[in-house]
Amino acid sequence: MKRKYTHIGLKSIKYLTLICLSLISLTSIAGPTLHEQIEKGAEQYLKNVLLNVDADTSIDVEIVKIDDRIKIPRCPSGYEYHASEESLRQSYVSVRVSCGNNDWYLFTSGQVTKTKEIVITHGALSPGTVLTASNLTVANVDIRRLRHTAYSEVDDLIGARIKRRVANGQAIQANMLCFVCKGDRITITAEVSGMEVKTAGIAQQDGVIGDNVKVLNASSQKAIIARVASPEEVVIHL
């Protein structure tokens, strides 16, 4: 009799094991939970909104995991997501999740990283170094680390000079360089009614392409304000 009960007990254990395995399989087939659905929805919402604002950037979003203890109702009409414009400018964005079928809502958040292809240094550069294709390259950079105008094309920087020591792999920004540097002898081009008059000048300020800088006319010794056109030339319109 003892052996019979043991045999029955083993059968029961086998049946229980099969039931447990079946439940585990059904759970895995069932798909994502409501918590996971909302996390994925919030991630996609932020990517879509931010890409519309910054079309030329890459967006990476990491949503904070929602506490499993929070009860989330099903939403037949689909969950709705919203973030304020102010929040979208931050590294951590707060997202309101709601359901049109009822008054339920919750807030979740995501860490946003924006990267963009920016020109960086290829090797350490010393003050006075002239930028060339050999000491520049392009890489994805977190744009929130940029404090000044950056450049996306290497060709836009050829001929500029570095004003201070710059480490390898650092993003080139407008405050680091000058196309026309103070003390440079340059050409002043005056455009008058379709004609051009050129004369020599001396830069009194540092400037990048497009900047208006103070320049001394070498002939008249008069100071003028002219626009930087290249490392060798400034232009004024009369």
Image (spheres, rainbow, N blue to C red):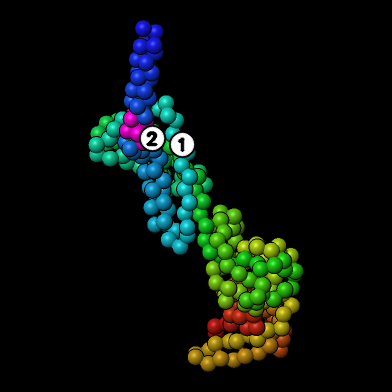
Looking at this view, is 205 or 143 the one in front?
A: 143
Q: Is residue 23 shown in magenta? A: yes
- The image shows residue 190 at horizontal and vertical percentages of 58, 87
**Residue 86 bears which disc, if any?**
none
Q: Name the residue under label 2.
A: 35
Q: Is residue 8 above or below residue 236?
A: above
- The image shows residue 139 at horizontal and vertical percentages of 57, 64
Looking at this view, is 150 or 234 the one in front?
A: 150
The mark nearer the N terminus, 1 or 2, is: 2
Taking 60 as reference, is 34 left or right? left
Q: In this view, does 102 lie above or below 168?
A: above
SS class, disc 1: loop
- Amino acid type at mark 2: His
Q: Name the residue under label 1.
A: 65
Residue 28 in view in this figure:
yes
SS class, disc 2: helix
For the stretch drawn in magenta, the main secondary structure is: helix
C-alpha separation, residue under disc 1 versus residue under disc 2: 8 Å
Residues packed near mark 2 inside 10 Å, few (<14), some (14 to 19) or many (20 plus):
some
> Considering the image in quadrants, where does the N terminus appear?
top left
At 24% across and 39% down in the image, what residue appears? 77
> Mark 1 touching mark 2, by CB under 8 A?
yes
Residues packed near mark 1 inside 10 Å, few (<14), some (14 to 19) or many (20 plus):
few
Q: Give the image quarter of residue 214.
A: bottom right
Q: In this view, does 184 lie above or below 139?
A: below
- Amino acid type at mark 1: Lys
Q: Give the image quarter of residue 176.
A: bottom right
The residue segment tinted magenta is 22-28
At 46% across and 42% down in the image, what residue appears? 63
Taking 63 as reference, is 105 left or right? left
- The image shows residue 155 at horizontal and vertical percentages of 57, 76
